[in-house]
Structure formats: C-alpha cells, structure tokens
Amino acid sequence: MQLREVVDVVTADEPPLSHSTEEIIRAGRKAERRRRAGFASAGAAGLVAVVVAGVSALPLVTGGQAGDVAAGTGESIAAPAAGSGAAEWPDAPPFTFTFKAFDAGKLRVQDPIVASTAYQIAPVYVDGMVTNDRAVNGDEAEQHPEKRKTGEVPSDKHVAAHLTLYRPGAFDPSGTEGGTSSTVAGRDAVQWTFTNPPARQLAWEYADDAWAVVTAYTQEVTPTFQELSTLVTAMKPSTPETATLPFTVGHVPAGYAPVELGTRATSGLNGVAGARDGDYGGAVYTKPALATTGLAAPWGADGENIPGSFTIFVTPSRNSNQQAEAGRTRCHQNESTFCNVWSADGKVQVQVNSEHLSVAETTRIAESVTLANVQDHDTWIPAAEALLP
C-alpha cells in the first residue's frame, strides 16, 4: 500500500477533520502490517503484535510524489555555532556503523539500528515531543481508556524522525523534487517541506559526495529547519563497528544477496518505526543485489516490499499476533508466502516472508536460521558471517 492510499483511508470519512501525523502513521502501520503478513486469508496473521489498537512498523516515506512537496519555506538556515571543523569519516565496509548516539540542541539521535550496503539509519527523538515507536501495552490502556480506540499515548505533540547516513555516492538530492538549496556551516545542503504527510527534511554533504538526511514527520512547528541544522556540526564519526545479528542463515537461494539489516530491531524504516518494541533483528535479501548509488530514500520507503526480495524477522513471540507453537514450523500462502519457526521454548519467532518464493523454498530458508542467545549481545554474529552461508 502506498502512503497516499493510507492518507486517503484516514481522511475519507469526514473531510473537514484534520488528522495528525500520528493518526496517519497509525493507519499506515496497520495497513502495512496487514499487507506484509498476508492477512488476505482468514487463517493468516501478521508478524508484529497488535496490542490494544495495534502499533506496527511504518514505512516512512522520505521522498514525496509530484504534487506532495511544497518547495521552500521562507525559513533561512543559519549556520550552527562554529568550532567543529570538518571530520574525517572512515572508509568502512557495508553493514558497518560509523557514528553513535549524540545530542544536538533538543534533538536526541539514538545509536543507528539499521545498516545496509548503502546507508545506516538511527531514530531521532525530540525534547517535549512523543515518538510512538513501541506498542501500547495493557497497563497503559487501563490508565488511558481513550487509547482503546486510538492505540496511542495521549499527546498533542507527536513526531516521527530518523537520520539516514548514506555512503559516498549513494544519495542524490536531485532525486526528490521541490528541494531548496542552501548552505549550513559551509556545507552544501538541501531542504524540503512535505505536505502529504506533513514533514520537514534536511540533507547535507557531511563528506565528499556523502550525504546525511534527517526527516521529521510532524504537524507541529518544531523541529524547525533551524533546529534540524544543529545536527550538521554535532554529528561526528566514531570507530567503525560491524553490525551484529542474533542469528545465522544457513540457506540462501542462488543469486540472492543481503542488502539491509536491523540489529535490536527489524530491518529498514519498519525497524526504525518500532525501535523500542524489543525486536531482535532482521534482514532483507534481493535478487539481484540492489544498486547502491543515486538513491533518493532508503529502500522500501514507499511502503512496498522491495521487488525480488525476501525478508527475515527475528522477534520475541510476544510481539506476534500469532499463537506461538514451541519448536514448530508453520507456513501460510496468500498474496505472499511466510513461514514461522518457533524456538524450542516458544519464546522466539523467526519469520521469513516473500511475495514470489515457493512455500518449500521459504520453509527451507526459515528452518536454516540458527539462533544465538538473543539476550546476550556478546554472542551475536558479525553481519557478513551471519548472512552468508
């Protein structure tokens, strides 16, 4: 489902009502969960837990479609306080994290949790605003009865934001229409204002031909472009750290290559949208491997599965709306095929999902996944070793 369709669904009943970004996000998460996990069958169910009204992963759209972008805002971006200078960024291989959590004004950038062959992504929180990146549990529902309908913690200040750090050559700012060029702290930058859904986005060249992009979905006046620009000089390189996963994959069909992973989260922007749900990890494979240059957004940002892909999710069974069956394998085939394998104690669920692989092939992949100790990060496996048999 495209996010435009989600907006149509959310706003269809009573046109005069305005809908917050969080309402749009909530609808998008529910629609994406149903689509991804094959809800077309009455007997099938999705991967991520539906708690109260259900909060699942949202494919946040970074690039707007024609007509969705309002070019320019009339808001100038002044350079943040001087004194940082240009940082030397390491020439790190794919699936490596090259920065850590940091603060910039009222913005709280978290450790990156998604890595790929082209970029890494970290959630961003904003002081005084709510980021709903976890499911609403039963205790909260009792304290706030209104959430039985909305599934959200009450707040009038919602934001969903993330920082994407692209590898050199990976990001092309001209790939999204309506941008306004500027300079921040002496670095080339481009800003966008999106209207559907409402968002602000700032990209800057943090190193030669290498761009960072912060995207904030909100209907509030903050974070402003001025506040987003504080990231430019606050972001610093760290010692490269290879992403690790709590599992290894023993079988990969011929021609498929890993392109994206999530650690302590599922992969992609879905993983970022559920960053605090306690998921363990995930990975995406494609055939052929995806091009790593000229990107306008992370893969799958339009809400669709990446063509020619299969996805692995490793999560606590409690985060699933399917009944755990300890030590068992169970598959479903609808618009897509997905197979679940539960750990011997039933506490961990492995799911493999594909729109084109057969049930037999999907089962073989799922049953080839070997778990490390999901609670002990010291036992987790470096990405290259974990993802390639």
Image: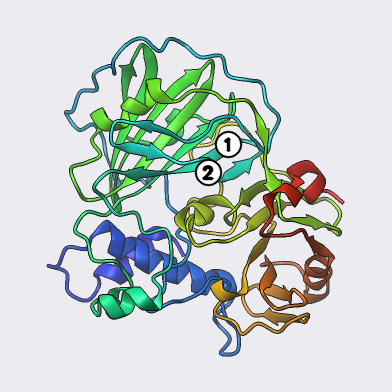
Please report the residue visible at 42 percent of the width from the left and 50 percent of the height from the top. Answer: 61
Nearer the viewer's eye, disc 1 or disc 2? 1
Please report the residue visible at 74 percent of the width from the left and 44 percent of the height from the top. Answer: 383
Where 199 sits versus 271, above or below? above
Where residue 278 appears, as percent x and y from the top left, is 54, 61
The residue tagged with tag 2: helix, strand or loop? loop
Q: Which residue is mark 2?
A: 298
Q: Residues within 10 Å of mark 2 (few under 14, many from 20)?
A: many
Where residue 367 appears, as percent x and y from the top left, is 82, 70
Residue ranking furthest to the left: 16
Q: Does the image show residue 25?
A: yes
Where residue 107 appears, as percent x and y from the top left, is 33, 37
- Say left or right for 68 vs 368: left
Where 323 sits versus 336, above or below? below
C-alpha distance separating marks 1 and 2 = 8 Å
Q: Which residue is mark 1?
A: 119
